[in-house]
């Protein structure tokens, strides 16, 4: 590295270091008897303390509330981080299940499910005799409307149950196959989300840092812009200077050989491939990843451009010539500038792709006299 380059890098790190190294760790907080840590965050914490899909509300009575887009609000009474699961509760959990429990649009899924048959039975029903393990749901029942649940594992359609009418067949989340046959909470697990910092609860520039004397985000951006503009100009000048020096050295060391009587045909203009047009990029196949995260190559689970692991519901695009795949948004921008695969550097055939190209200037050698 030349002294000029070293000076530039030193100045850049000196001026920008205070603005990018200031940060803090989000401490584990509690709401009632439940500890809240990454990926979860309370709504009054900075956004960087958790993942946006794991927000909690802590009520004035110290009760954690979680909201599901298609199932409403539930209380959370337990969170286990080592073997990740949480328990949802409600004054009448079976009523919420009977109304429909939908986890679509959330990162949560059941640990295990067990199917129950909900039935409405009159007071003279013999269901508790025929099925001793049947569950009685008092919060759903009233006079002459008694709601019972039978695990489908035990249910025998050939065994008559007097004075009962089947209401619904419901898949109920349970802890594991050996869990006792009762329903008093809803256990759910989740996949740990990808975090962009290590540790995950580190806030490089959180709002709470202002309480400790740090600059606000707006002030930091203004200072960075004011310092960054002249530094960027200096960087451009240094790059230009280095290119000129390199070219001059190359010309000085280039042998000047002229062969008498030799004539040459004009050289064809060189072709430099820049990128692909939009229609060619759109012709590359895309795949929408499902919840099972079935990738073409299971070991190739991270985008080589942004280095982020693939997540469910993301779209990947495959380069057909080499079958390497990337985030669609990443590879689309790449292919607009460079038609070669970022991994193997293979370029598509010009006959099968619309390449955006530019030509170098052609020249003819001066004939010898």
Image (cartoon, grey):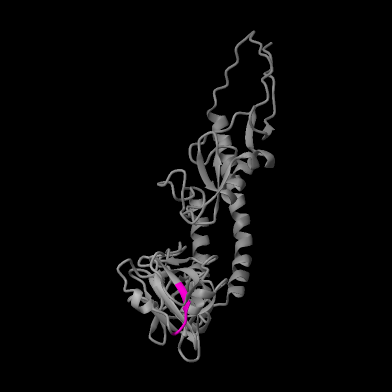
Q: Is residue 121 magenta?
A: yes
Query: What secondary structure predominates along the stretch shown in magenta?
Result: strand
Residue at the (63%, 37%) spot, across then down: 274
Considering the image in quadrants, where does the C terminus appear? Answer: top right
Q: Position of residue 235 (x, y in %)?
A: 58, 53
Q: Is residue 149 magenta?
A: no
Residue at the (40%, 46%) spot, across then down: 299
Q: Position of residue 92 (x, y in %)?
A: 47, 83
Q: Position of residue 330 (x, y in %)?
A: 57, 50
Is residue 111 visible in the rendered image? The answer is no
- 279 or 254, which is in the foreground? 279
Farthest left residue in view: 178
- 369 or 112, which is in the foreground? 112
Residue 64's place in the image compared with 83, above or below, is: below
Count of marks overlaid on the render: 0
Is residue 58 visible in the rendered image? The answer is yes
Q: Position of residue 28 (x, y in %)?
A: 40, 79
Left or right: where 296 falls relative to 174: right
- 61 or 163, which is in the foreground? 163
Farthest bottom residue in view: 61
User: Residue 180 appears in which quarter of the rendering?
Assistant: bottom left
- 297 or 245, which is in the foreground? 297
Farthest top residue in view: 261
| Start-end of magenta stretch | 118-123
């Amino acid at each position: 590295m030349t002294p000029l380059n070293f000076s530039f890098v030193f100045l850049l790190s000196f001026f920008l270091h205070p603005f990018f190294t200031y940060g803090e760790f989000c401490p584990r907080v509690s709401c009632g008897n439940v500890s809240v840590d990454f990926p979860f965050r309370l709504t009054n914490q900075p956004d960087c303390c958790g993942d946006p899909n794991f927000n909690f509300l802590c009520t004035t009575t110290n009760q954690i509330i979680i909201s599901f887009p298609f199932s409403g609000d539930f209380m959370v009474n337990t969170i286990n981080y080592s073997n990740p699961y949480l328990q949802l509760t409600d004054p009448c959990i079976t009523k919420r299940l009977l109304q429909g429990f939908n986890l679509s649009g959330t990162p949560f899924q059941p640990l295990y499910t067990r199917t129950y048959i909900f039935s409405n039975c009159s007071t003279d029903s013999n269901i508790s005799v025929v099925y001793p393990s049947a569950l009685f749901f008092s919060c759903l029942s009233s006079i002459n409307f008694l709601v019972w649940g039978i695990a489908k594992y035990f249910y025998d359609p050939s065994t008559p149950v007097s004075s009962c009418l089947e209401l619904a067949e419901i898949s109920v989340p349970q802890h594991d196959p050996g869990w006792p046959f009762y329903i008093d909470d809803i256990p759910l697990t989740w996949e740990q989300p990808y975090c962009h910092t290590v540790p995950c609860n580190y806030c490089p520039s959180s709002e709470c840092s202002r309480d400790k004397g740090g600059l606000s985000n707006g002030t930091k951006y203004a200072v960075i812009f004011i310092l960054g503009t002249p530094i960027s100009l200096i960087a451009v000048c240094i790059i230009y200077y280095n290119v000129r020096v390199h070219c001059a050295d190359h010309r000085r060391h280039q042998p000047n050989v002229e062969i008498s009587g030799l004539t040459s045909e004009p050289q064809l203009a060189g072709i430099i491939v820049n990128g692909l047009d939009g229609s060619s990029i759109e012709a590359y196949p895309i795949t929408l990843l499902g919840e099972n995260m079935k990738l073409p190559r299971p070991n190739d689970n991270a985008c080589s451009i942004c280095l982020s692991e693939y997540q469910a519901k993301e779209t990947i695009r495959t380069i057909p010539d080499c079958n390497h795949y990337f985030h669609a948004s990443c590879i689309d921008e790449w292919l607009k500038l460079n038609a070669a695969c970022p991994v193997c550097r293979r370029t598509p055939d010009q006959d099968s792709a619309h390449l955006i190209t530019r030509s170098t200037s052609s020249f003819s050698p001066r004939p010898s006299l």
